[in-house]
Image (cartoon, rainbow, N blue to C red):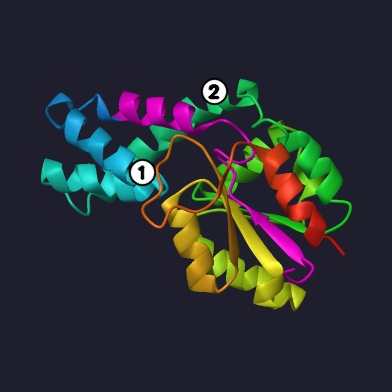
Amino acid sequence: MPPALQAIVLDFDGVVLESNEVKTEAFRGVFARFPAHLEAAMAFHFANAWKSRYEKIDFLLDRLGRPGDAALREELAREFSERVLRQIETVPFVTGAKEFLEEFSRRVPLHVASVTPQEDIERTIRQRDLMQFFSGVYGCPPWTKPTAIHDVLRRGGYSAARVVLVGDAPGDRSAATEAGIGFVARRSRIPFDDPIPTLYADLTEVGDALRPRLA
């Protein structure tokens, strides 16, 4: 039996909320301003679903021949944020997510590590009345998932062997590996590369898998 958990780090989109599709449609709306590059930009998004909005916008700027255009970069990021925030209040929870947060937050510190910028992820968590469940919320920027995990370990004095990241994308698994912690995969529409991890359908199944590791 693996050691008892000292903390759990959660990705947010596709783990707490079923918000991956909202963000896909927001990217489509933003990139549609440049129809000659829409298909390529969306292909990049689908191939790199776990990366930050800024990396996807930078890909578009490179195709536009405008790398380093900070003003356009921020304009597109702001439009993307506005599109997402208009819809995020009504996005459903991943099945079992609210129950997971209510149960597990009473027994082990929970943290969020997201590729959503800090201001936006905090706003969403407050809008959905979830802040009380989390000991820490990390957005990108200013954090990356590996640096967020390292901060969780440092601040809590936790053993890496006793912390896991729950995510739904290859980038989440890579972040957990880089930080030296365990990884638990929720199955969303984002495919994993081989070796494919054990995939749990929702947070009910994730909770069942992790409950034996609670002290």
Q: Secondary structure at mark 2?
A: helix
> Is residue 141 shown to the viewer in this render?
no
Q: Is residue 68 above or below residue 76?
A: below
Percent of width and height locating residue 213: 79, 61
* Quarter location, residue 159: bottom right
131 magenta-colored: no
3 up-or-down from 78: above or below:
below
Is residue 114 or residue 209 the one in the foreground? 209
Q: What's the residue at 16%, 48% (across, down)? A: 62
Q: Amino acid at mark 1?
A: Glu
- Within the magenta stretch, is there residue 27? yes
Which label is found at residue 62?
Answer: none
Residue at x-position 84% and y-position 41%: 102
Outermost residue to the front: 1
- Count of picture labels: 2
Mark 1 neighbour density, 10 Å: few (under 14) some (14–19) many (20 or more) = few
Q: Quadrant of the C terminus?
A: bottom right
Q: Residues within 10 Å of mark 2 (few under 14, many from 20)?
A: few
Q: Position of residue 186 (x, y in %)?
A: 57, 44
Point out the tag, 2 or 1, that comes first from the N-terminus. Answer: 1
Q: Which residues are magenta?
A: 1-30
Task: Judge from the rendering whether residue 68 lies leftward or rightward of residue 56; answer left or right.
Answer: left
Mark 1 falls on what kind of element? helix
- Position of 141 relative to 33 (above/below): below
Q: Tell me the CA gap for discs 2 and 1.
A: 18 Å
Q: Amino acid at mark 2?
A: Arg
State the image quarter where residue 37 is shown.
Answer: top left
Question: Disc 2 marks which residue?
Answer: 86
CB under 8 Å between callouts 2 and 1? no
Q: Which mark is residue 74?
A: 1
